[in-house]
Every structure is written in C-alpha cells, then in structure tokens.
Amino acid sequence: MTEAVPHSDLAFADTNGIELAYDTFGYRTDPPLLLITGLGVQMIVWDEKFCEKLAARGYWIIRFDNRDIGLSTNFAPAGVPNISALLEAQSRGEALNVPYTLTDMANDAMGLLDALGIDSAHVVGLSMGGMIGQIMALRFPERIRSLTSVMSTTGDPNLPPPKPEALSVLVIPIPAERTAYIESWLHVWRVLSGPKFQVEESLARKWAELSHDRGLNPHGFLRQMAAVMASGSRKEALKDLTVPTLVLHGDADPLVPVECGIDTANSIPGAKLHIIEGMGHALPEALWPQVIDAIAGHAS
C-alpha cells in the first residue's frame, strides 16, 4: 500500500508573463521533481495515484498545465495556426511564424520553479514534455539535477514518422459535447497504447471527464503542435548536454517510434536508455511500477 502523502490544492503561478496552474504531492523538504506533460494534454494525465506513488519514493512532485491547455493561460488571441501551410513552409526550409516555441514553454517551466523558490529540480518530461525538458537542461544545466525523457525525441527529421493509425488520431476534430468527447478520448488512447498494454478504460475515462470539465482548448493543441514544428531538431545541441539523463521509451510506441528514443539516448553523452517491452505512447497503470522505479532510481 502506498504511504499517504500530502496533495496540495490547485494553485496558480505567474511566470514568463503568463499564469500556470499547478499542484504538488509530497513534502516540500524532499527533492523537487517537476513533471511536464505532452502535446494537448492536461496535467491530470500525470495521474494522482501515479504522483502519490512517486512522491512516496521521497520526492516533492510538481505537475502543471502547460501554456494554452487546461487552466493555464490561453493564447486564443494568437489565432489558429494553419498546420498545412506550416508543413509546406517547413518542406521549403523556411522559418515558421508561430505564436510561441518550445523554448518559450521551457522558460515557463523554469519560471514555475522560480515562483516556487526552487533552485534546482529533477525534471521528467513526457513526449512534448520530454522535448521541453531537453531544452531546459540545455539552457539551464545548473538548475536541472537530472532529466528523464519519456517517449520523446531529438526532433531529427530523418527519424521514422508516426504510424498512420497514430497520426490519424491527431487530426480527429475534438468534440465539444461531453459524451462524444469522452468516447473520442477513449479511441485515442486505445490507438496510442498499442496492443499489449492498453490504458485501463476506467483510467482513460477519468482523464477524459476531468479534461472536459476543466475546459477544452482545441486551438491550443494546434498552437502547441506548431511550437513543436517550429522548434526543429535538438540533435546537434544535445551532444553538449551535461545533465544526467535517462531515456524511457516503449518498443511498441506508434506515435514516437522507439528509434526516436534510441536516437535521443545516443545523442546525449552518458545517457542511459531503458526500453520497456510492449509499452506504447501511454502510461497504463500496469506499467507504473516499472516507470516509477526507473524515474526514482535515476533521480537518486
């Protein structure tokens, strides 16, 4: 049984000219560990029980909504990016004009640490969050105790693309009606989980209900996608990364193929690579013990 740990109320921090919603698990006297989530998903995908179990390993866990999602600052005035036009410009080698980049999002996360009075922290980033974590470690190495990059990538355009079925769920229109939204969400997680370790339906349904009730921002998803596109490859820069790094990846990931995780580990000097057999692009409860062991072991 997991030891009961404190869970803070929802709070808001002013950072980098915006406001981020966050909460914490565990004791402030423990080493801080910042969880960064992925494209278009809210902080609640770092499930409360997952956070409690990780905090019980001796860490003060902080999770937050990235800009433009959940309860953090919405960038609606920036308009809706034309992803097709951005792809065409990218294919011509042109610089992309987007509302913000992953560097802005990395600065948001550092600003949250500042607001909490944290000099340095362990950082765990999931998918797009892994990209943000990589940028944090490159820009502020003295403030990152360790980096765990989960199901993420260097952004090298020569890496294998997503599987067609995974790519298809990124372009499904997001329904506004609650029941339709929940069913759409369940479909997305069935595809992303892969065949061996499906996200438990009760867990995915809970995430869907919470996400809908906290507030939908489908255009924020597109602006975040544009930020990923505009930020390009980190492959060369990562050769100079000095932060102790663990790369976690599933060998059944349909969205960010396992080759992307291998490339990330190979690009970072001294990085450790942990491939989880059968894991897709999701964190089902069945895999939490293995993932938490890896994160806590690396951070220690």
Image: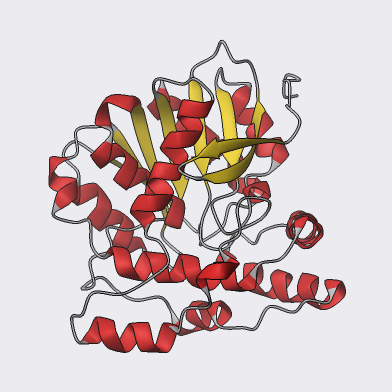
Residue 13 image offset from top left, x and y in percent: 59, 35
The residue sitting at 58% across, 46% down in the picture is 287
Q: Is residue 67 above or below residue 116?
A: below
Q: Is residue 227 above or below residue 44?
A: below
Quadrant occupied by the N terminus? top right
Q: Is residue 162 above or below residue 20?
A: below
Q: Is residue 148 above or below residue 130?
A: above
* Residue 98: quadrant of the picture: bottom left
Of residues 232 and 260, the one nearer the viewer is 232
Relative placement, left or right, of 251 versus 56 is: left
Residue 18 image offset from top left, x and y in percent: 54, 47
Relative placement, left or right, of 73 versus 8 is: left
- For the question of whether residue 293 can be seen, the reply is no
The residue sitting at 61% across, 83% down in the picture is 172
Relative placement, left or right, of 150 versus 115 is: left
Quadrant occupied by the C terminus? top left
- For the question of whether residue 96 can be seen, the reply is yes
The residue sitting at 54% across, 77% down in the picture is 170
Residue 11 image offset from top left, x and y in percent: 69, 34
